[in-house]
Image (spheres, helix red, strand yellow):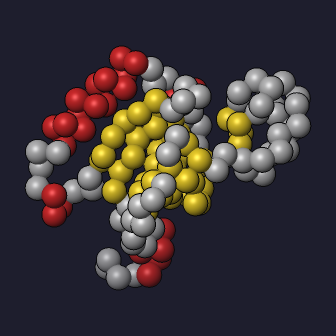
Amino acid sequence: MKLCQNCGQLVAEEIITCPSCGSEVVEGRRHIDDYWIEEILHEGYSSILCRGRKEGVEEPVMIRIFTPQSGVDEKIAERLKQELEELKKLPEDYFVKHLDIRRSSDGLWYRVSEWIDTENWGTLLSSGRLQ
């Protein structure tokens, strides 16, 4: 994911010209606050999924960065935080741990979750093992 330095628009890695203002977009985002982004897994309209690591920590995490188009604001973020608190009451063995919802230093909302190292659904379904 890249961020246009002129207008702040989030754009996909392969885009070199900002569709909003026409400025050249050179380097993609490599961190968000104290998390390093190691890999972009999916770029969608409302969010970008990344594998990352917190500085000084070895275990990877899943980072979902909500784009400005997602509509996430203070009110929605507060509701998401309350939902995360409820999820923390569920048995840890059966659910992904969602660690935090934050607003980055440059204003983007993001959620940090436990990283689960597994196959994606497409690979699993095409393998035939679920039949």
Q: Nearer the viewer, residue 60 or 64?
A: 60
Q: Nearer the viewer, residue 44 or 103?
A: 103
Q: Quadrant of residue 72?
A: top left
Residue 130: % across, % down = 32, 77
User: Residue 123, relative to residue 75: is it above or below?
Assistant: below
- Furthest toward the top, the residue is 75
Q: Quadrant of residue 12?
A: top right
**70 sits left or right of 14 in the view:** left
- Furthest toward the front, the residue is 56
User: Residue 52, relative to residue 76: is it above or below?
Assistant: below
User: Residue 14, relative to residue 59: is it above or below?
Assistant: above
Residue sitting at x 28%, y 31%: 81
Q: Nearer the viewer, residue 5 or 87?
A: 5
Q: Quadrant of the image for the C terminus? A: bottom left
Q: Disc count in the image? A: 0
**130 sits left or right of 40 in the view:** left
Residue 51: % across, % down = 50, 58
Residue 69 visible in rendering: no
User: Residue 102, relative to residue 76: is it above or below?
Assistant: below
**18 sits left or right of 64 in the view:** right
**112 sits left or right of 6 in the view:** left
Residue sitting at x 39%, y 70%: 117
Residue sitting at x 40%, y 18%: 74
Residue 96 visible in rendering: yes
Residue 11: % across, % down = 71, 39
Q: Nearer the viewer, residue 34 or 125?
A: 34
